Amino acid sequence: MSDAGSQDRLRIDKWLWHARVVKTRSLAAKLVADGHVRVNGTRTDAPAKTVKAGDVLTVALERTVRVYRVKALGERRGPATEAQTLYEDLSPEPPR
């Protein structure tokens, strides 16, 4: 995977894990496989689907829906401060 095309895309399950949306990569894969993730408004059930900078992900979590714009792909699962640089949170404010 050293060709230039693979450097600007990352598997969606890996990105969710790198961005600390979920605790493990297997949970990320299950979330996607169960149909709880949309990429640019289109539902996906393939954990191997790739995402790139600029994509908008809608993730239905246990009690909330989160919306993220991918800003960067990341190379590892780092600390939370590093993970926050991977996305812009577009999630609506929770009702009071």
Image: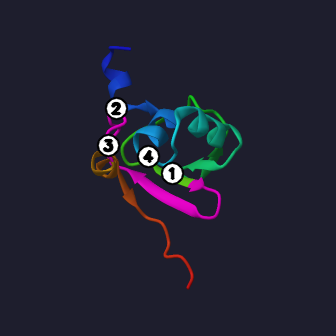
C-beta proximity under 8 Å, tags 2 and 1: no
Between marks 2 and 3, how big is the CA–CA gap?
A: 12 Å
Name the kind of residue labelled 3 in the image: Ala
Camera-side mark, 3 or 4: 4
- Closest to the observer: 20 or 15? 20
Question: The residue tagged with tag 4: helix, strand or loop?
Answer: loop
Residue 68 drawn in magenta:
yes
The x, y position of residue 19, in whole percent, is 41, 45
C-beta proximity under 8 Å, tags 3 and 4: no
Between marks 2 and 4, how big is the CA–CA gap?
A: 11 Å
On the image, numbered disc 1 is attached to which residue? Answer: 57
Q: Which mark is residue 86?
A: none
Name the kind of residue labelled 2 in the image: Arg
Q: Earlier in the sequence, mark 1 or mark 4?
A: 4
Name the kind of residue labelled 1 in the image: Leu
Q: Earlier in the sequence, mark 2 or mark 4?
A: 4
Name the kind of residue labelled 4 in the image: Arg
Between marks 2 and 1, how big is the CA–CA gap?
A: 19 Å
Q: Main secondary structure of the magenta part?
A: loop
Between marks 1 and 3, how big is the CA–CA gap?
A: 13 Å
Between marks 1 and 4, how big is the CA–CA gap?
A: 14 Å
The x, y position of residue 22, in whole percent, is 52, 45
On the image, numbered disc 2 is attached to which residue? Answer: 76
x 35%, y 38%: residue = 73
Camera-side mark, 2 or 3: 2
The x, y position of residue 12, in whole percent, is 51, 37
Start-end of magenta stretch = 59-79
x 32%, y 39%: residue = 78
On the image, numbered disc 4 is attached to which residue? Answer: 20
Residue 50 drawn in magenta:
no
